[in-house]
Image: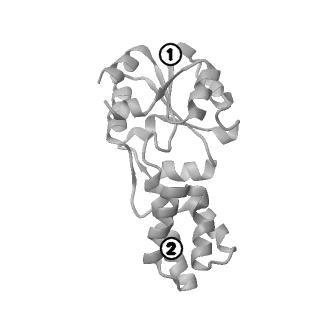
Amino acid sequence: MSTWSDYLNSKSAFVFELDDVLYPEKDYLLQVYYLFAQFMEYGEQVSASEMVPFMQQVYQTEGADEVFGKTAARFGLPEKYRLNFELLMHSAKLPLKLLLFQEILQFLQTVVVERKHIFLFTNGDASTQLNKIRQVEWHGLEQYLKVYFAAESELKPSPAGLLQILDEHQLDRADVLLVGRNEADRICAEQAGVDFLNVEKLLLT
């Protein structure tokens, strides 16, 4: 709890990445894989019950970028379905809501009670990220979020989008904390002159 209280006392604005910071990204990806497999079962008469675990395994061992190519090769899917896969990734209506990490939910609720700023500043494709955001169970917190997409300025580690946030909201660098997970987030914060916190420290409190 000391990590929470230390930063709540010393900062007035909190900037969060989305994937694997506010919620587990796999919860989105695995639902998209399920929907794609169902589509392929209908369109190409392949077994969705075999395709889903294969896609999960590729994701876990080789990463999301390899999933379509390896799945297409394994199940003999025509290349034309790559577009369907990408469209689903951008705009899928998920069967289940995306749930925030419990510790993050509690932290965000405390930030709101303390009347401090919450910004969502996320990397990646803007349409995909917006689709994720719309399907998160925010517990009413969405009305307090100000959302920025790095793709609309420059992707992190560029600090351009973060500097835009500081400028538009007239924030002092010393009052801002960027909460992320990866090296791009850390470098972005460093180049903008704001403090960085790896989200793991919040998830461990």
| Quadrant position of the N terminus in the picture | top left
**Which image quadrant for residue 49?**
bottom left
**Numbered circle sitting on residue 37:** 2
Task: Name above or below for residue 193 compared with residue 186.
Answer: above
**Which image quadrant for residue 94?**
bottom left
Q: Where is residue 192 in the image (x, y as percent from the top left)?
A: 63, 21
Between 189 and 55, the residue placed more toward the observer is: 55
**Residue farthest to the left?**
1
Q: In this view, does 105 lie to the left or right of 40?
A: left
Kindly identify the residue that appears in the image at 57 percent across and 83 percent down: 43
What secondary structure is marked by label 2? helix
Disc 2 residue crowd, few under 14, some 14–19, many 20+, Cα 10 Å: many
Q: Position of residue 97 (x, y in %)?
A: 39, 55
Task: Name above or below for residue 133 compared with residue 145.
Answer: below
Q: Position of residue 203 (x, y in %)?
A: 36, 35
**Numbered circle sitting on residue 175:** 1
Q: What's the image's color scheme? A: one colour
Question: In the image, what residue type sits under mark 2?
Answer: Ala
Q: How many marks do you count on the picture?
A: 2
Disc 1 residue crowd, few under 14, some 14–19, many 20+, Cα 10 Å: some
What secondary structure is marked by label 1? helix
Question: In the image, what residue type sits under mark 1?
Answer: Asp
Kindly identify the residue that appears in the image at 35 percent across and 24 percent down: 4
Between 142 and 67, the residue placed more toward the observer is: 67
| Quadrant position of the C terminus in the picture | top left
Q: Where is residue 130 in the image (x, y as percent from the top left)?
A: 56, 49
Mark nearer the N terminus (1 vs 2):
2
